Amino acid sequence: MTAAGPAAFPSATAAEAQVTRNPTLVDKSASTATMNAHSRARLEAIADLLDSRWRIPGTGVRFGADALLSLLPGLGPVVSTAISTYLIWASRRLGVSTGTVLRMIGNVGLDAVISSVPLAGPVGDVFFRANRRNMALLRTHLASGSA
């Protein structure tokens, strides 16, 4: 096995050959910012779907799939909590601190407890929006620039 250098890539500079051998050496500052923006937009869309996608006509009350999933005994709250856990995991990948992750876990845990209450769970999910709270925590973290 030989090391690939500029000679292995006749038209490439030494830096281009290095990047070709090791694509992780590409300048990540611009691509990371774009990736973070895409990740944040995706997480915001998921949180919106779970907590505030639809509005009850004639009122300002919004609800999402989380409240609808709470109507399904057993499976609904589990699915909702699993999706919320994905939001926390993705936030952690964006560099959120351990303390913020613990606050996010607390929000989702409280939401899971509320969702598990028969009949009252869906109503509680309409008013306690754990995923929107978690996205506010993520926005605060990203705005502070502490990555």
Image (tube, rainbow, N blue to C red):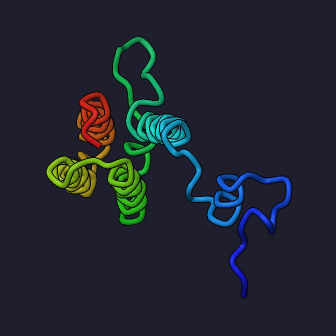
The answer to whether residue 56 is visible is: yes
Image coordinates for residue 23, horizontal then vertical, percent: 63, 59
Relative placement, left or right, of 142 versus 75 is: left
Residue at horizontal 29 percent and vertical 43 percent from the top: 147
Foreground residue among 82 and 126 = 82
Residue at horizontal 18 percent and vertical 55 percent from the top: 98
Looking at this view, name the residue that lies furthest to the top. Answer: 58
Residue at horizontal 21 percent and vertical 50 percent from the top: 97
Image coordinates for residue 115, horizontal then vertical, percent: 27, 52
Query: How many callouts does the rendering have?
Result: 0
Image coordinates for residue 14, horizontal then vertical, percent: 68, 56
Image coordinates for residue 62, horizontal then vertical, percent: 38, 25
Foreground residue among 10 and 132 = 10
Relative placement, left or right, of 88 versus 35 is: left
Foreground residue among 6 and 143 = 6
16 lies above or below 5: above
Looking at this view, name the residue that lies furthest to the right. Answer: 10
107 lies above or below 20: above
The answer to whether residue 70 is visible is: no
Foreground residue among 73 and 3 = 3
